[in-house]
Amino acid sequence: AEADPGLLRIIARAYDFQEPLIRNPDLTVPAIASQEWLTIGYLSRILRLPSLAPDIVTAIINGKHPPQLSAKRLMRLALKLPTDWAEQRKFLGFQ
């Protein structure tokens, strides 16, 4: 299967947005949101994605994600994403 360009893009963006927050403890989500012209809601959702299980990220990169998992669906579910990796797999439709 081919990797989904939309999924790849939001996973990459998630890590790009997480990086400055890790490097600079004084940086806030609202500050990044205004700097990047994004809503706080969008940024809050995308910043949940770096907590995806590593095998889920690998599956997305390799195009081996469930067919129903689109970038739009992942973003819609992001705030409800379980922290437990086994729960994430179930929640997102991985076997």
Image: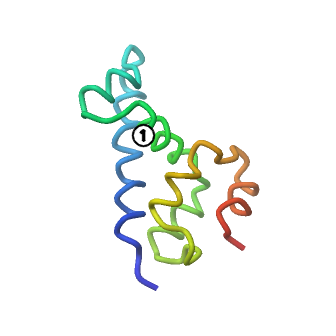
The residue under the point 38% across, 14% down is: 26
90 and 34: which is toward the camera: 34
Residue 88 appears left or right of 37: right
- The residue indicated by pointer 1 is 42
Q: Position of residue 46 (x, y in %)?
A: 45, 44
Above or below, comparing residue 12 to residue 19 in the picture: below
The residue under the point 69% across, 43% down is: 83
Residue 7 appears left or right of 92: left
Q: Position of residue 25 (x, y in %)?
A: 42, 17
Which residue ends up furthest to the bottom in the rendered image? 1
Q: Amino acid at mark 1?
A: Tyr
Q: Position of residue 31 (x, y in %)?
A: 32, 21
The residue under the point 46% across, 75% down is: 62
Element type at mark 1: helix
Which residue ends up furthest to the top in the rendered image? 26
How was the colour assigned to the protein in this rendering? rainbow
Quadrant for the C terminus in the image: bottom right
